[in-house]
Image (spheres, helix red, strand yellow):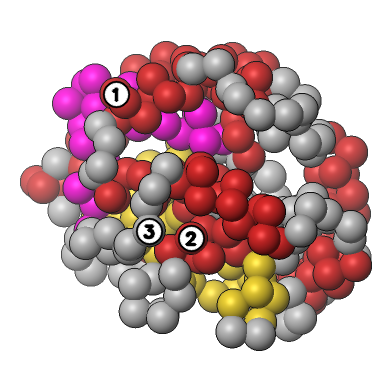
Amino acid sequence: MAGTALVLGGGGLTGIGWEIGMLAGLADAGIDLADADVVIGTSAGSIVGAHLTSRRHTLAELYAHQLAAPSGGSAVRMGPAAFARFAAIALRSRDTVSFGARMGKLALAARTVPEKEQRAAIARTLGGLTDWPARRLVITAVDAATGQRTAFDDTSGVALIDAVGASCAVPGIYPPVTIDGTRWIDGGVHSAANADLATGFARVVVVAPVAISGGPIVGPRSQGNRLARQGARVCVITPDRAARSAFGRNVLDPTRRAAAARAGRRQAATHAADVRRLWSPTAA
């Protein structure tokens, strides 16, 4: 067991803001999680992971972007009702694969914006990033037909924009992404963080905007505890009360991302000492 892994979970636009704020706050304390041996991104975390590993922009620049006034139309709605619907489906599912297949069926039947339009939106979010980074980035998605999770990386033969788009394809809200004839949906359908993919790494930091679990879905803390039992040193960071308040009731509301980013940066001070001890090479 060796090496470091940074796990970035899903959580909508507010999740992106909070994660970037958290990473910026930890960087303020002298902790650069971008030097992880692997970054594992799910949904919102796939976007943050792509920017982080590309090194095209500094964390200060990424943070400043989150504070800027949002452009574009009205917010897409994903609030408590949507989460409750997903939870109800989870409770009726025997395992994560059957849940994924049920969510895939929902996604394939839903009326959403055209896939081409959503791909263009992902391209704008990536800000011109087209190539997989030199540093290892893993992006999760779920096969809409089978419910099986996959982990895309630079060896998968999949364009970065399509891997990110697939990971962000929230069922019923955004269209499934077609890659070589297979339709893919949000990696968060399998797990909010997919921290189990960090198995084998000695030091793991999990930054998870959504900490929900239920039915067959294992939450980030449970996944972190499992990694710890296997011998890893693990720190799981989830939003505090102030951050959850900053998110509001719609994680896809762009007007909330600045408050979420500020909340993440403030909260980082609470975790900096623990993360520094874990991330130090002498901690292995």
Q: 221 left or right of 198?
A: right
Disc 3 crowd, CA 10 A, few/some/many (<14, 14-19, 20+): some
The answer to whether mark 3 and mark 2 are in CB contact below 8 A is yes
Mark closest to the chain's N terminus, 3 or 2: 3
Q: Is residue 111 magenta?
A: no
Q: Earlier in the sequence, mark 1 or mark 2?
A: 1
81 over 198 or under it: above or below? above
The answer to which image quadrant residue 78 occupies is top right
Counting from the top left corner in percent of width and height, residue 116 is at 67, 60
**The residue stretch that appears in magenta:** 15-37
Residue 161's tag is 2
Residue 96 percent across, percent down from the top left: 71, 70
The residue sitting at the left extreme is 282
How many residues crowd around disc 2 within 10 Å: few (fewer than 14), some, or many (20 or more)?
many
Q: Is residue 226 visible?
A: no
Q: Marks 3/1: CA distance?
A: 21 Å
